[in-house]
Image (spheres, rainbow, N blue to C red):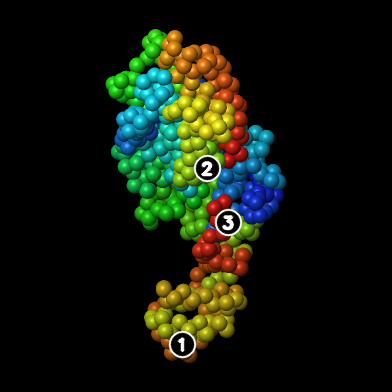
């Protein structure tokens, strides 16, 4: 079986900034692969490389078996791209936008019309189909953009941060739309800095940082690889956080995390059951009243922290790499 | 899921089809944006009327009524001022990801650029037509035949198409709309230091050097020559063919530089 995407040692520099620093990635056909990383980690650069939009400095990159450098035309016939901007024409209706892209994809007039109709239905845009796109809400524009990426029935959809900037409801609607596509047999490569998004949508996660692959595997595998559970304590008053932090500090295998706004203290532990008992004991000794205590699997935030030593989606000050990220 | 999903039978669109599709999009954008229609309908005519009535009274000694001298020059240089809009649109398309979408599609490399150049030449022709009609209404007269007049108009449109490629190229390199607008300032010396508004012989010597050796002067004179009929040779010092050949050479030069440059930039991203 040919892998849908096969990247080996992929490198790309912009001046002094190294956007991709020998990235390796394999995406098997029939999967949704999420590339996860903070701003400036190289996610967008990688998607642009897969979409034949930039020239690689080094390494090999194959899409559906076609070499991105030597057979870019073939690759373009296989992919559909939805970037970070909703790249739709505001002065055309939703339907016209889709038909334009479908025809540029090589479909004849009639097939393009039919395909646009199907996509409008899939994305719940039938009612808005004949309105100019400039009258659409942000969420609808994103959906239309997603529609444009799939109206040519590509084998591989490339979605670069598909839900960035959307409100929670629009985000969930877009997730639903993506899930339906996946069920219909389209392969997806998406980038995100939202861990829950990756967790919701992806079969495979590739965590990248500074243009390099840090870890890859299914969400469950990655959580397992961290080899730990998390004790999380929810306290009643924020002035009690310090006491609980101290109490938990003795049992964790690494630093205690304190989240002030939600009044939660958490720590990764190894021998889960015993650790939980100990935690309860030492909290009781402090006399602090707690709302809740729980033993749970680490979330992807904690996975990222454990793998890279820094929190995911950290809001860094804009660096030259940020644009090319 | 199957390993490689079955895809409908398709091949990349033909060159002409993709050109037309991209052209159509740019034209729809124009006709459905009232601000653009107003801008491209009245802007050029407004400036024409200012030149005609504000400066026209003070300029003498061009050998023919000033309005007859001005119109061919104004219309020809109008191509430059209108073209700045092309750079801005191109840069915005690039900045807002629209070009990336098109670049990721299996279409000929020239489509996006050619489509823009064709569409904007059409829009330019509309602007030129309106201004020409107004020019006739305020006293402009052809000294030659109507056919020569039509040829003159056709020539301006042809120069317009040539310059659209220059503006497409500038837009590709500008980065964003504002920068493109700024780069558009490059047209001012070419438009003004030419034979468009006043005879080159009235300029100081060092300015004449530039005015005589830049593309606009032979283009303006070629167009003007076609509107002057039998007086052309006497008034302009050379037959029409003299200007036409020079204008054609400049046009070929501009295309030879800009088309490959724009396509290379489009490929590289």
Count neighbours of disc 1 (C-alpha within 10 A) and say few if under 14, some if 14 to 19, many if 20 or more.
some
User: In this image, A72 relative to A234: left or right?
Assistant: right
Please state the total of marks drawn on the protein image. Answer: 3
The correct choice, above or below, for B1 with respect to B142 in the image is below
* C-beta proximity under 8 Å, tags 1 and 2: no
On whether disc 1 and disc 2 are found on a single subunit, the reply is: no
Camera-side residue: A294 or B164? B164
User: In this image, B169 relative to B22: left or right?
Assistant: right
* C-beta proximity under 8 Å, tags 1 and 3: no
Residue at mark 1 to residue at mark 2: CA–CA distance: 65 Å
Q: Secondary structure at mark 3?
A: helix
Q: Nearer the viewer, mark 1 or mark 3?
A: 3
Residue at mark 2 to residue at mark 3: CA–CA distance: 18 Å
Residue at screen point 29% across, 23% down: B138
Q: Position of residue A5 (x, y in %)?
A: 62, 43
Q: Chain of mark 1?
A: A
* C-beta proximity under 8 Å, tags 2 and 3: no
From this viewpoint, is residue B37 visible? no
Give the residue pinned by disc 2.
B174
Give the residue pinned by disc 3.
A320
Q: Position of residue A100 (x, y in %)?
A: 43, 31
Camera-side residue: B83 or A100? B83
Q: Chain of mark 3?
A: A
On whether disc 1 and disc 3 are found on a single subunit, the reply is: yes
Count neighbours of disc 2 (C-alpha within 10 A) and say few if under 14, some if 14 to 19, many if 20 or more.
many
Q: Quadrant of the N terminus of chain B?
A: top right
């Amino acid at each position: 079986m040919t892998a849908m995407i096969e990247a080996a040692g992929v490198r790309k520099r912009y001046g002094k900034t190294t956007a991709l620093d020998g990235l390796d990635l394999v995406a098997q056909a029939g999967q949704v692969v999420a590339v996860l990383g903070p701003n400036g980690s190289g996610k967008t650069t990688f998607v642009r490389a897969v979409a034949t939009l930039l020239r690689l400095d080094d390494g090999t990159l194959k899409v559906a078996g076609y070499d991105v450098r030597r057979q870019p035309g073939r690759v373009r016939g296989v992919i559909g791209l939805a970037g970070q901007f909703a790249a739709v024409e505001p002065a055309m209706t939703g339907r016209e936008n889709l038909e334009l892209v479908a025809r540029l994809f090589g479909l004849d007039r009639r097939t393009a019309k039919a395909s646009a109709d199907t996509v409008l239905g899939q994305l719940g845009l039938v009612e808005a189909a004949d309105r100019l796109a400039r009258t659409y809400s942000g969420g609808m524009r994103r959906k239309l953009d997603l529609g444009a990426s799939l109206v040519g029935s590509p084998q591989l959809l490339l979605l670069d941060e598909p839900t960035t900037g959307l409100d929670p409801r629009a985000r969930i609607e877009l997730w639903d739309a993506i899930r339906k596509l996946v069920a219909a047999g389209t392969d997806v490569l998406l980038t995100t800095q939202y861990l829950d998004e990756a967790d919701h949508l992806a079969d495979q996660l590739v965590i990248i940082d500074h243009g390099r692959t840090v870890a890859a595997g299914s969400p469950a595998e990655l959580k397992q690889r961290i080899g730990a559970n998390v004790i999380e304590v929810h306290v009643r008053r924020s002035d009690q956080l310090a006491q609980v932090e101290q109490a938990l500090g003795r049992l964790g295998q690494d630093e205690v995390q304190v989240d002030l706004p939600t009044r939660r203290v958490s720590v990764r532990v190894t021998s889960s059951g015993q650790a939980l008992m100990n935690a309860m004991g030492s909290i009781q000794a402090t006399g602090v009243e707690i709302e809740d205590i729980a033993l749970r699997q680490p979330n992807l935030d904690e996975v990222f922290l454990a793998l890279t030593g820094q929190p995911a989606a950290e809001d860094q000050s804009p660096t030259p790499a940020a644009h090319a990220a | 899921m199957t390993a490689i999903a079955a895809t409908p039978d398709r091949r990349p669109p033909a060159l002409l089809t993709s050109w037309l599709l991209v052209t159509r999009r740019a034209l729809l954008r124009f006709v459905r944006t009232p601000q653009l229609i107003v801008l491209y309908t009245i802007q050029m005519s407004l400036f024409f009327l200012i030149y005609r009535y504000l400066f026209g009274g003070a300029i003498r000694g061009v050998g023919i009524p000033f309005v007859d001298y001005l119109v061919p020059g104004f219309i020809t240089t109008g191509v430059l001022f209108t073209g700045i809009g092309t750079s801005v649109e191109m840069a915005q398309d690039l900045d807002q990801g629209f070009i990336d979408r098109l670049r990721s599609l299996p279409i000929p490399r020239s489509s996006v650029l050619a489509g823009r150049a064709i569409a904007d030449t059409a829009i330019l022709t509309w602007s030129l037509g309106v201004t020409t009609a107004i020019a006739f209404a305020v006293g402009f007269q052809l000294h030659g035949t109507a056919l020569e007049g039509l040829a003159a108009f056709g020539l301006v449109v042809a120069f317009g198409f040539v310059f659209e490629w220059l503006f497409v190229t500038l837009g590709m390199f500008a980065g964003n709309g504002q920068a493109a607008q700024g780069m558009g300032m490059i047209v001012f010396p070419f438009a003004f230091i030419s034979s468009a508004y006043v005879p080159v012989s009235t300029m100081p010597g060092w300015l004449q050097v530039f005015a005589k050796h830049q593309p606009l002067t032979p283009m303006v004179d070629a167009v003007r020559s076609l509107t002057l009929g039998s007086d052309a040779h006497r008034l302009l010092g050379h037959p029409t063919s003299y200007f036409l050949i020079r204008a054609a050479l400049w046009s070929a030069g501009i295309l030879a530089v800009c088309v490959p440059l724009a396509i290379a930039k489009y490929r590289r991203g």
